[in-house]
Image (tube, rainbow, N blue to C red):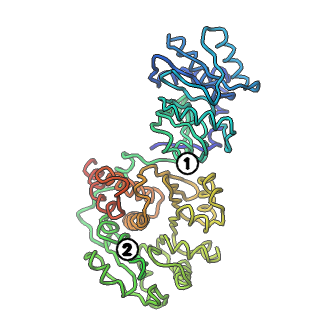
């Protein structure tokens, strides 16, 4: 399990460390620990900002110089520096270490660049002069090691406009949200960490393979299909028959282990669905203009399902809103709302969600969450963890905020899903995820670790498929096909 920390955690941990060390002692320790992680070259450029990230770079440069490594210091032209920065710079000035002013036109002849320009105190936006400097560094295509976080990358959101691209980023003491979210994957090739003291506990975690092996168990011999969940998936329309097929298909809900799967959709697409899926049952629903017509007497028998998943290919209209209202008001099992179910929900008064009898799991992507939360997209991108956590806590539900790195939270515990590939960014991928989630929560519970497990398996299947196919050609149905391989890797390795 990888622990991830918020800015509040960082402030607290930093305060605890400063009770044990002076600031100068702590930065010296950082320099010593960083030195052990870096494979220095014959010549090395240290980019030094004006704050404590620059101090870390200076402490590291002094450590490297002590070990007879060639060092050149590049500093920003500024009279405003932190006290520790001034202190370490004064030590540098007493030695025969070259000191150069860093500009937008600087040409680096060194083999390795150490990025210590902007650290954890940086917040967007980035000043224009630093944008030019960072662009210049990236254009030279050097081997770069970033200290704590890549300069220009926000450590709380993983967002940024102009960001240094690193071969290696070394987190100092704590992994932070910005090391994993949003644009971080595009700019951090490899992530490592130094630990200054014992690691504190965190409410944000990333599942690793060993954790997943504990969450997936072998089936008992003395069991039957009922032990693994009766589930109903409601969705599909004349224009979106593929969504419900991907979610329910033998390679999604059923291949993930659900006991009995019932597909609830309009009669006019029944032949399309059953041509793909032989093991599921079909429950016909009335239709109007090619989409589901809500009739209470038809939906009521579905309320005995252990899990109901609704929304895939549903279309957003008044009938969909009636369906969501009814399920929230009457169903007492686990209710997963996806796709057009979320769009219908966003048009309802939030009292339905607040007073829901069901145990609700929502799976919005950023745009859908914007409609649900009534927040602007940019605000969500800059504060995804806090807004997702706040929403889940307010409505007492589990929220999966889908992005290239998804946030899974119940308002107390949070998981990040850092797996996946850009090839999964295609229509239909979310339907596959919904099908997998339906299966896992039907077999286990709606515990947040089970929801995180479903996300892990889904994204692992996407990664495995991408290795054999490619990111451009990868289809959501390919993710379904690779579920068997991923589950084999987990189950056979136990």
SS under mark 1: loop
**Label of residue 161 in the image:** none
Q: Closer to the observer: label 2 or label 1? A: 2
Which residue carries the number 1 mark?
A: 203
* Secondary structure at numbered mark 2: helix
**164 horizontally vs 246: left or right:** right
| Residue at image point 41% right, 58% down | 424
Residue 280 percent location from the top left of the image: 30, 77
Q: Position of residue 285 (x, y in %)?
A: 41, 87
Give how far across and how far down residue 470 sits, in percent.
33, 52
Furthest toward the front, the residue is 105
Please tell me which residue is depicted at 52% across the width and 24% down the height of the picture: 34
> In the image shown, does 213 or 49 lie closer to the viewer?
49
| Residue in the picture at 53% in, 85% down | 319
Q: Quadrant of residue 393?
A: bottom right
In this view, 338 is above or below 188: below
Q: In which quarter of the image is residue 286?
A: bottom left
- In x, y percent, where is residue 191? 47, 36
Q: Residues within 10 Å of mark 1 (few under 14, many from 20)?
A: some
Q: Is residue 235 above or below residue 166?
A: below
Q: Which of 301 and 149 is in front in this view?
A: 149
Q: Residues within 10 Å of mark 2 (few under 14, many from 20)?
A: many
> Spatial distance from mark 2 to mark 1, Cα to Cα?
37 Å
Q: In this view, does 355 lie to the left or right of 224?
A: right
Label count reads 2
Of the two numbered discs 2 and 1 on the same chain, state the one appearing first in sequence.
1
Quadrant of the frame with the N terminus: top left
**Residue at (50%, 52%) from the top-left corner?**
415
Q: Name the residue under label 2.
A: 242
């Amino acid at each position: 399990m990888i622990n991830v920390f918020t800015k509040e955690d960082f402030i607290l941990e930093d305060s605890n460390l400063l009770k044990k060390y002076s600031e100068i002692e702590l930065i010296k320790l950082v320099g010593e620990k960083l030195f052990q992680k870096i494979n220095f070259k014959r010549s090395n450029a240290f980019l030094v900002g004006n704050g404590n990230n620059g101090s870390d770079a200076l402490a590291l440069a002094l450590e490297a110089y002590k070990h007879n490594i060639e060092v050149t210091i590049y500093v920003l032209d500024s009279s405003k520096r932190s006290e520790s920065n001034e202190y370490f710079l004064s030590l540098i000035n007493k030695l025969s270490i070259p000191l150069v002013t860093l500009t937008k036109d600087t040409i680096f002849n060194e083999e390795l660049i150490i990025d210590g320009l902007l650290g954890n105190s940086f917040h967007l936006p980035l000043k224009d002069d630093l944008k030019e400097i960072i662009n210049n560094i990236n254009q030279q295509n050097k081997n770069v090691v970033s200290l704590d976080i890549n300069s220009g990358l926000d450590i709380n959101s993983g967002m940024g406009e102009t960001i240094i691209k690193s071969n290696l980023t070394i987190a100092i003491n704590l992994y932070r949200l910005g090391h994993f979210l949003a644009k971080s994957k595009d700019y951090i090739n490899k992530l490592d960490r130094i630990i200054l003291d014992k690691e504190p506990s965190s409410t944000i975690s990333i599942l690793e393979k060993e954790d997943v092996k504990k969450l997936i168990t072998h089936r008992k011999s003395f069991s039957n299909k009922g032990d693994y969940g009766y589930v109903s998936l409601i969705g599909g329309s004349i224009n979106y028959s593929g969504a419900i097929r991907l979610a329910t298909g033998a390679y999604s809900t059923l291949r993930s282990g659900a006991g009995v799967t019932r597909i609830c959709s309009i009669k006019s697409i029944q032949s399309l669905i059953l041509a793909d899926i032989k093991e599921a049952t079909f429950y016909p629903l009335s239709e109007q203009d090619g989409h589901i017509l809500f009739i209470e007497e038809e939906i009521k028998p579905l309320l005995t399902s252990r899990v109901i998943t609704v929304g895939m290919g549903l279309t957003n209209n008044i009938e969909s809103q009636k369906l969501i209202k009814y399920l929230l008001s009457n169903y007492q099992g686990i209710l997963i709302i996806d796709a057009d179910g979320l769009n219908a929900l966003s048009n309802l008064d939030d009292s339905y969600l607040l007073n829901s009898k069901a145990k609700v799991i929502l799976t919005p992507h950023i745009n859908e969450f914007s409609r649900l939360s009534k927040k602007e997209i940019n605000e969500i991108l800059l504060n995804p963890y806090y807004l997702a956590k706040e929403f889940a806590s307010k409505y007492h539900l589990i929220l999966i905020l889908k992005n290239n790195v998804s946030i899974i939270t119940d308002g107390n515990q949070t998981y990040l899903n850092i797996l996946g590939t850009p090839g999964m960014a295609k229509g239909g991928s979310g339907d596959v995820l919904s099908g997998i989630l339906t299966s896992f929560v039907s077999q286990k519970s709606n515990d947040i670790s089970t929801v995180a497990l479903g996300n892990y398996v889904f994204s692992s299947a996407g990664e495995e498929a991408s290795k054999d196919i490619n990111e451009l050609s990868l289809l959501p149905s390919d993710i379904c096909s690779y579920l068997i391989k991923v589950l084999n890797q987990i189950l056979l390795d136990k």
